[in-house]
Image (spheres, rainbow, N blue to C red):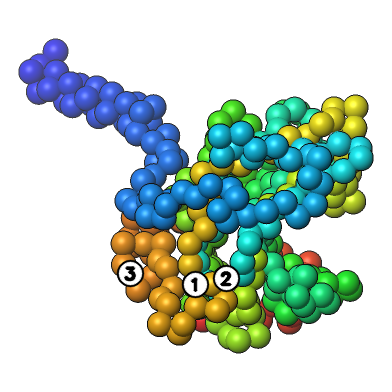
Amino acid sequence: MSSSSSFINTIVLFILCFFIITTIFLVPLTNAQPSPGFSPSNKFRTIGFFQGFRNLWGPQHQKLEQNQLTIWLDKSSGSGFKSNRAFRSGYFGASVKLHPGYTAGVITSLYLSNNEVHPGNHDEVDIEFLGTTPGKPYTLQTNVYVRGSGDGSRIVGREVKFNLWFDPTANFHHYAILWSPREIIFLVDDIPIRRYKKKSDSTFPVRPMWVYGSVWDASSWATEGGKYKADYNYQPFYARYTNFKLSGCPENAPNSCGAVSASPNPAGGLSRPQNMAIQWAQKNHMVYDYCKDSRRDHSVTPECFMA
């Protein structure tokens, strides 16, 4: 064999090896969890549960130990808690550990709402964990209701759903909602997963809201559209909360109270690494987007078409 042929064969072998190594080791890394480059959860101090919250219902299904709140659902009742005051903007978060095994029909939540003040015409911003059957992942549902669009027959959900990139029953993970006058950002372990911008006064919540958490039976719709119901042979269903964050402008704060930010920029928005992280989350883990659902009546969600 000539020296030139040997050289060519060496080059071909090198290219082939490089391709194999790239395929095996580098391509999977493109789906690895990215760093958002900034941790909003570290920006806001952790508070004691009773510094910011109180029991709302089901007190017999609620236990607090070393600032870890456990609430649970059984056949007799679920449980919920509520912030002591309302806010008109802010960062609201908690670390949550979910119940393993069969949890179909069970909802664990962290959300903002003013339903008690505006029944039939309320606003709401949700993080909801939709229970599941063994072997299938929890679904994290984010949702926004505006001025009664979640009340009665006027249900206009703005749902975006995700399957998480970790087991939410194995450890605590931090979930948060940042609500400013210009946008709502949902975060998981400081990774922004959804950004809901204010595109008009009619599609954005602006009235003060309280912060809530709860575990309850939503068998009619929670798991695969209600296909699987809560099975109380597996009760009780626990949800554990800790690392509470409650920071922002209360409803009676002066106008000088500035909205908080989820990024290094005090003015808000997202940094370049955060934008890359949200693109990663939506590309790899988003399983439903109401704006892309052809079965929906998008005349009631005009923000889907606004620039």
| Along the viewing direction, whichever of 293 and 95 lies nearer the viewer | 95
Residue 181, position as x, y percentages in the image: 50, 78
126 or 80, which lies in front? 80
Q: Amino acid at mark 2?
A: Phe
Q: Residue at x 17, y 21 (%)?
A: 10
**Contact between labelled residues 1 and 2, with CB atoms less than 8 Å apart:** yes
Nearer the N terminus, badge 3 or badge 2? 2
Residue located 50% across and 78% down the image? 253
Q: x%, y% of residue 220?
A: 90, 51
Up/down of 154 relative to 14, above or below: below
Report helix, strand or loop for mark 2. strand
Q: Which mark is residue 266?
A: 3
Specify the amino acid type for callout 3.
Answer: Pro
Is 105 situated left or right of 264 in this image? right
Instruction: Name the mark nearer the viewer: 1 or 3.
Output: 1
Please indicate whether residue 90 sits to the left or right of residue 238 in the image.
left
* Mark 2, residue position: 87
The residue where tag 1 is placed is 249
Q: Earlier in the sequence, mark 1 or mark 3?
A: 1
Q: Earlier in the sequence, mark 2 or mark 1?
A: 2
Which label belongs to residue 43? none
Which quadrant of the figure has residue 124?
bottom right
